[in-house]
């Protein structure tokens, strides 16, 4: 097409007219075609037809040409508007990502400052705590030596009873000091772990491999800690789970805490059930979610009551007896998964039946160093 208007007086008398099929269909005689030209290329045509032979005047051709020019401008504006809208959406998404990364950077900096303070307090507590634990143990042994020394001395029966009662009470008190001192020592150690700065090493890791490794670590750890520990471990790994960029050491610690809680709940239910045929089971599964990967840990233990479920990620909250838990395990896991990796951790449970913890990790984590430079 030449890019100029074509004004045909009578299509039936024009030997070059080739659209006879349309002429027969619509019965027109005079025809005007005005091209829509953008940057030298024809992008469309305004076609006007008359059923009688009546040539379009120059004025009419000029008017249609003006409409065609305006139509080209409108089409170009619409195209530009769509491009601007698409670019605006891209910029909005980039801005949202930047804000999220900046928020994570600020949160990390706050946690680092809080961690340094916590670590300082924990270190200051550790020395006097060691003193209390060591001297309480030594004092309990001295009470036994005192009893042995007093055994050979002559005392009235009433005095002997009072001495035995006093030394017994003193020894019991010292044993309680030792017991709670050890629990305080465990809390201080977990505070130091909780306040530890983010590991500098993050790399791509096979998710199925790290879950398998954590299961083995947790199993052997539980066997070493508790004589006769038994539980069935079921695995269901998605081959498509693939790799994710994580801090392997920290994710291992987070999953160990989750699995250890599952072991505890299942063995506790078995102890409560006695010999009614209950068998403790812990199931671990992985699943690819596209740009994320999911890890699920499910136990058939005691479950979690609703009022407790709301608090399980709070620091120092525990339902375990004194000396068996510090209340920092799941809090550490939450910080590692959510705050460090930008993932999520959710809990489904039914008291007396099961607990399932779902950990979702992104395939890639934002570089806090790069975010700091952009901020």
Image (cartoon, rainbow, N blue to C red):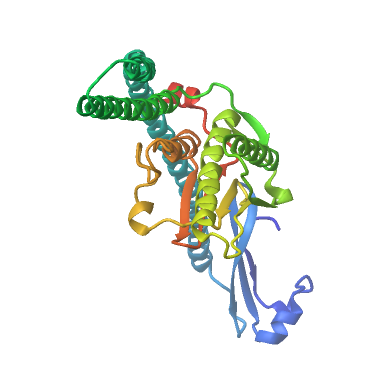
Query: Residue 237 appears at what percent x and percent y?
Result: 70, 50
Q: Position of residue 74 (x, y in %)?
A: 47, 57
Residue 196 occupies quadrant: top left
The reply to whether residue 4 is visible in this rendering is: no
Q: Is residue 270 visible?
A: yes
Up-down: is 217 above or below 22? above
**Residue that appears at 71% across and 49% down:** 240
Point out the residue furthest to the right here: 15
What residue appears at the point 52 percent right and 32 percent down from the top-left corner? 366
Q: Quadrant of the N terminus?
A: bottom right
> Which of the image's four quarters has the C terminus?
top left
Describe residue 91's horizontal placement relative to residue 117 as left or right.
right
Q: Residue at x 62, y 82 (%)?
A: 53
Frontmost residue, 157 versus 250:
157
Residue 91, above or below 375: below
Count of marks overlaid on the render: 0
Residue 247, relative to residue 150: is it above or below?
below
Q: Position of residue 207 (x, y in %)?
A: 66, 41
Q: Is residue 254 left or right of residue 136?
A: right
Residue 101 placement (x, y as % from top left): 44, 33
Front residue of 161 and 179: 161
Front position in the image: 324 or 233: 324
């Amino acid at each position: 097409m030449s890019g100029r208007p074509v004004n045909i007086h009578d299509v039936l008398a024009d030997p070059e007219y080739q659209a006879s099929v349309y002429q027969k269909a619509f019965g027109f005689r005079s025809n005007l075609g005005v091209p829509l030209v953008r940057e030298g290329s024809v992008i469309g045509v305004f076609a006007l037809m008359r059923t009688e032979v009546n040539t379009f005047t120059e004025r009419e051709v000029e008017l249609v040409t003006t409409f065609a020019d305006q139509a080209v401008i409108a089409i170009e504006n619409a195209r530009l508007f769509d491009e601007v809208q698409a670019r605006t959406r891209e910029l909005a998404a980039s801005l949202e990502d930047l804000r999220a990364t900046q928020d994570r950077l600020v949160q990390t900096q706050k946690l680092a400052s809080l961690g340094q303070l916590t670590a300082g307090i924990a270190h200051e507590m550790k020395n006097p705590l060691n003193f209390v634990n060591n001297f309480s143990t030594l004092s309990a042994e001295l009470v036994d030596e005192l009893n042995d020394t007093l055994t050979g001395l002559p005392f009235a029966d009433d005095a002997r009873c009072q001495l035995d009662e006093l030394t017994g009470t003193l020894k019991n008190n010292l044993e309680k000091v030792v017991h709670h001192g050890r629990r305080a020592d465990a809390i201080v150690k977990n505070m130091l772990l909780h306040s530890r700065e983010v590991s500098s090493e993050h790399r791509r890791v096979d998710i199925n491999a790290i879950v398998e490794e954590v299961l083995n670590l947790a199993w052997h750890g539980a066997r070493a800690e508790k004589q006769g520990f038994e539980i069935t471990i079921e695995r269901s790994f998605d081959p498509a789970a693939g790799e994710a960029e994580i801090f392997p050491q920290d994710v291992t610690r987070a999953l160990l805490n989750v699995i250890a809680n599952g072991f505890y709940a299942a063995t506790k239910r078995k102890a409560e059930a006695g010999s009614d045929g209950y068998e403790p089971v812990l199931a671990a599964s992985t699943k690819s979610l596209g740009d994320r990967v999911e890890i699920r840990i499910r136990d058939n233990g005691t479950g979690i009551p609703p009022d407790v479920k709301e608090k399980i990620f709070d620091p120092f909250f525990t339902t375990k007896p004194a000396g068996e838990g510090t209340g920092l395990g799941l809090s550490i896991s939450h910080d590692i998964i959510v705050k460090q990796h930008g993932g999520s951790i959710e809990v489904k449970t039914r008291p007396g039946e099961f607990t399932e913890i779902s950990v979702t990790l992104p395939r890639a984590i934002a570089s806090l160093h790069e975010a700091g430079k952009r901020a």
